[in-house]
Image (spheres, rainbow, N blue to C red):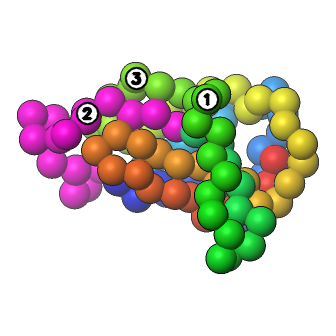
């Protein structure tokens, strides 16, 4: 499902509790999902043509229901950048706009 937050204007602080949200409007019933459980990972894109540098080995949240439409977690201690992205995995992978931590 498409991520609705964070947006391009979002700024997170290390140690802050944040919520990632996504649009569940067109989400099929749970019984029809390949994987109804979600995982959120942090990554970055140094340029629009760069690949997604995803931190797969350290998910920010996992095993939540995609149908919930949101999940909260504490922002990890990472280097300040303005090109972070969030990837939502479950039935499909969706990427947020770049934002700042």
Does 29 appear above or below 26?
above
Quarter of the figure with residue 84: bottom right
Label number found at residue 36: 2
Q: Is residue 67 left or right of residue 34?
A: right
Q: Is residue 56 left or right of residue 78?
A: left
- For the residues labelled 1 and 3, the Cα–Cα distance comes to 15 Å
Magenta portion: prevailing SS class: loop
Element type at mark 1: loop
Residue named by callout 1: 57
Does 86 appear above or below 60?
below
Residues rendered magenta in the picture: 23-40
Residue, x 32% and y 30% (percent of image)? 37
Mark 2 or 1 closer to N-term? 2
Tag nearer the camera, 1 or 3: 1
Tag nearer the camera, 2 or 1: 1
Residue named by callout 3: 63
Where is residue 74? Give x, y as percent: 70, 26
Q: Are marks 2 and 1 in contact (CB under 8 Å)?
A: no
Q: Residues within 10 Å of mark 2 (few under 14, many from 20)?
A: many
Mark 2 or 3 closer to N-term? 2
Residue, x 89% and y 42% (percent of image)? 79
Toward the right, the furthest residue is: 80
Mark 1 or 3 closer to N-term? 1
Where is residue 11? Give x, y as percent: 78, 52
Q: 89 and 66: which one is in front?
A: 89
- For the residues labelled 2 and 3, the Cα–Cα distance comes to 9 Å
């Amino acid at each position: 499902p498409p991520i609705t937050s964070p947006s391009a204007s979002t700024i997170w602080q290390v140690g802050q509790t944040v919520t990632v949200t996504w649009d569940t409007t067109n989400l099929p019933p749970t019984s029809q999902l390949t994987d109804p459980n979600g995982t959120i990972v942090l990554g970055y894109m140094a340029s629009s043509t760069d690949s997604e540098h995803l931190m797969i080995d350290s998910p920010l949240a996992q095993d939540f229901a995609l149908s919930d439409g949101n999940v909260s977690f504490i922002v990890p201690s990472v280097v300040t950048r303005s090109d972070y992205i969030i990837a939502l995995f479950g039935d499909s992978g969706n990427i947020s706009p770049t934002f700042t931590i």
